C-alpha cells in the first residue's frame, strides 16, 4: 500500500533541496550574459554553486525555506480532511529533519510553533476536486523576501499614469520590479494577475508559477507583453541581488480574471531565484515527483 505521508515528505525534501531543471537552466543562461569579472556574474556563479551543494547534500537551497503552499487536485476517494492530515504531518516531520526551517510565527503573540504548523492558513493548502483517478499535489516554497516585494495596483493609477489597459499593466509591472530593487533576491520571476478581487488576484498571480519557465500565454498579445515586461525589466540595470547587471527578471507569466466593473486590479507576485516548486503525481499504487 502506498504511504502518502512518505510520498509527501519526499516531495517536500526535493522541493526544498533540488531546484527544478527549467529554473536552473535560466540561471545558467543568465550567468553567461553578465560581464566576466563583474559582481553580477560572481553572484550568479555563487548561486549556482549553492544549488549544486544543496542537491548533493540534500540540504535546503536557502536558509528561508519559505511558506509551504500546496495545490491539491484530488479524486473523490481522497478526502480533504485525509489529505490535510497527511500534508500537515509531513510538514511537521520535514521540519524535524531540518528540511524546512520553523517558520510559522503567531502574528499576535510572536510565538513560533516550532513545526511549521500554524492556523488553517499555515501551511497553505488549496483543494480542487476532479473526476480523474489521479492525485496531483503541487508544492511551492515561497520565501519571505520575495513575498515582501509583491505589489497590488488598483488601476487607473494617476501617479504612475497607468490606465485600465495592457499598457497600464506593463507600467505597473515595471514599477513593482523597480520598487523591489535587489530586495526580492533577484534575478526573479514575475507572476501577474489582471482582474479578480484583491484576494483572488493574489491567488492567481501565484498559481502561474506552477507553469514551466519560458512558456507563453496562448493569446499572442499577452504573450508579447510577457516578453516585453521581462525585456524592459532587465533594462533597469538592477541585476542579480541588486548589484547591477543584465539579469533582473528571468521570466514573466500573466493570467486574466473576470472583475467587477468598479475594480481593475493588477497583482504582481515576485519569485526569487530560489524558485522552488515540484509536483507529486499518484496513480494507483505508484507515485512520481517532477
Image: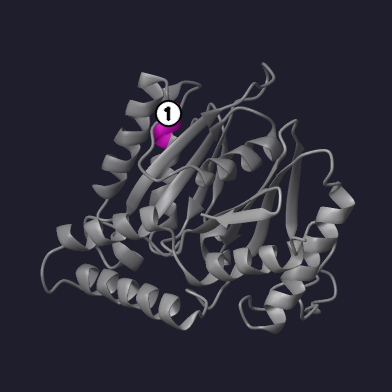
Position of residue 23 relative to residue 195, above or below, is below
Q: According to the image, what is the colour scheme of the structure?
A: one colour
Residue drawn at 40 percent across, 34 percent down: 171
Using the image as rendered, state which of residue 208 and residue 43 is in the foreground. 208
Locate residue 128: give its quadrant: top right
Magenta segment main secondary structure: helix
Residue drawn at 31 percent across, 45 percent down: 233
Query: Label 1, on which residue?
Result: 217
Would residue 201 be found to the left or right of residue 180 on screen? right
Determine if the magenta segment contains residue 101.
Answer: no
Residue 49 location (% of width, % of height): 31, 77
Question: Residue farthest to the left?
Answer: 36
Q: Give the range drawn in magenta.
A: 167-171
Using the image as rendered, state which of residue 11 and residue 88 is in the foreground. 11
Quadrant for the N terminus, please: bottom right
Residue 42 location (% of width, % of height): 22, 74
Amino acid at each position: 500500500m502506498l504511504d502518502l505521508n512518505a510520498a509527501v515528505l519526499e516531495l517536500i525534501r526535493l522541493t526544498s533541496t533540488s531546484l527544478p531543471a527549467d529554473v536552473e537552466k535560466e540561471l545558467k543562461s543568465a550567468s553567461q550574459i553578465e560581464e566576466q569579472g563583474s559582481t553580477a556574474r560572481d553572484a550568479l556563479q555563487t548561486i549556482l554553486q549553492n544549488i549544486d551543494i544543496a542537491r548533493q547534500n540534500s540540504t535546503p537551497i536557502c536558509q528561508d525555506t519559505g511558506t509551504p503552499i500546496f495545490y491539491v487536485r484530488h479524486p473523490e476517494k481522497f478526502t480533504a480532511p485525509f489529505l490535510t492530515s497527511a500534508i500537515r504531518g509531513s510538514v511537521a516531520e520535514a521540519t524535524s529533519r531540518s528540511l524546512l526551517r520553523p517558520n510559522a510565527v503567531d502574528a499576535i503573540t510572536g510565538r513560533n510553533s516550532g513545526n511549521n504548523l500554524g492556523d488553517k492558513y499555515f501551511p497553505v493548502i488549496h483543494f480542487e476536486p476532479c473526476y480523474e483517478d489521479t492525485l496531483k499535489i503541487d508544492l511551492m516554497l515561497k520565501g519571505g523576501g520575495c513575498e515582501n516585494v509583491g505589489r497590488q495596483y488598483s488601476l487607473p493609477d494617476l501617479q504612475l499614469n497607468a490606465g485600465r489597459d495592457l499598457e497600464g499593466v506593463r507600467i505597473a509591472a515595471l514599477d513593482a520590479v523597480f520598487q523591489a530593487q535587489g530586495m526580492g533576491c533577484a534575478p526573479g520571476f514575475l507572476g501577474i494577475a489582471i482582474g479578480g478581487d484583491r484576494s483572488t488576484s493574489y491567488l492567481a498571480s501565484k498559481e502561474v508559477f506552477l507553469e514551466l519557465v519560458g512558456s507563453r500565454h496562448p493569446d499572442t498579445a499577452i504573450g508579447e507583453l510577457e516578453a516585453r515586461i521581462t525585456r524592459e525589466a532587465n533594462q533597469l540595470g538592477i541585476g542579480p541581488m541588486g548589484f547591477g547587471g543584465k539579469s533582473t527578471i528571468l521570466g514573466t507569466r500573466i493570467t486574466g480574471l473576470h472583475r467587477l466593473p468598479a475594480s481593475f486590479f493588477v497583482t504582481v507576485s515576485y519569485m526569487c531565484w530560489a524558485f522552488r516548486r515540484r509536483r507529486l503525481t499518484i496513480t494507483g499504487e505508484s507515485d512520481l515527483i517532477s
